[in-house]
Amino acid sequence: MSSTKFILGLFDDPDDLLHGIEKLQKNSVPIYDVYSPMPIHGIEAKLGIKESRLGYAAFCFGCLGATVIFSIIYYTLVHDWPMNIGGKPTTSDWWAPLTPVFIPFTFEWTILFTAFGMTFTFFAATHLFPGRAPRVMDLRATDDRFVIAIDAKGNVPHDDITNLLKEAGAVEVKHNDRKYVSYE
């Protein structure tokens, strides 16, 4: 039994990488992931990656921030320390909490909660917490190589995958026995 976990195809050119993705997909070889030192337009659609749900998280964090500060202001100005400004008490009408006094604070806290919430969500989703070494399949993927990673377990024979990658223009094909390489 082979100890190979991943087969990596390293490419010099993004066009060769896209050609390699097409060739692997035509032969129904599942691709684990693709690593690139720069963004490649349209690669998400080619790989079938779903659109991110981070927008929904941002909306929820914004609603949470608006609700928290609105509750604090309402409790403070209406129940705990009501003020009668200009002969108009804040509890006289049902729309009184929607006065212009509430709007700037609510807006600012909405933005604040969204920003901090999205930062923490991004760190949690990508496992890039401060102080943690990034997980990379091949160190050259952060510099000048484009990498296609294929899960070797339970896949078509490794020689066939190697031949497909070389036909597509891979400069080098590696068989990794570890999932990630550390920077040390």
Image: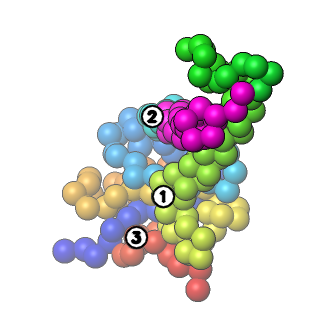
Q: Which residues are magenta?
A: 55-84
- Report x, y in % for residue 8: 47, 62
Residue 164 magenta-highlighted: no
Of the 4 image quadrants, the one containing the N terminus is: bottom left
Depth check: 90 or 161 in front?
Answer: 90
Of the 4 image quadrants, the one containing the C terminus is: bottom right
Q: Residue furthest right?
A: 86
Number of marks in picture: 3
Q: Calculate the distance from the C-alpha at mark 2 to the C-alpha at mark 3.
A: 23 Å
Magenta part, dominant SS:
helix
Q: Calculate the distance from the C-alpha at mark 2 to the C-alpha at mark 1.
A: 18 Å
- Report x, y in % for residue 128: 55, 64
Q: Which residue is mark 3?
A: 179
Residue 63 magenta-highlighted: yes
The residue type indicated by label 1 comes to: Ala
Residue contact at pointers 2 and 1, CB within 8 angstroms: no
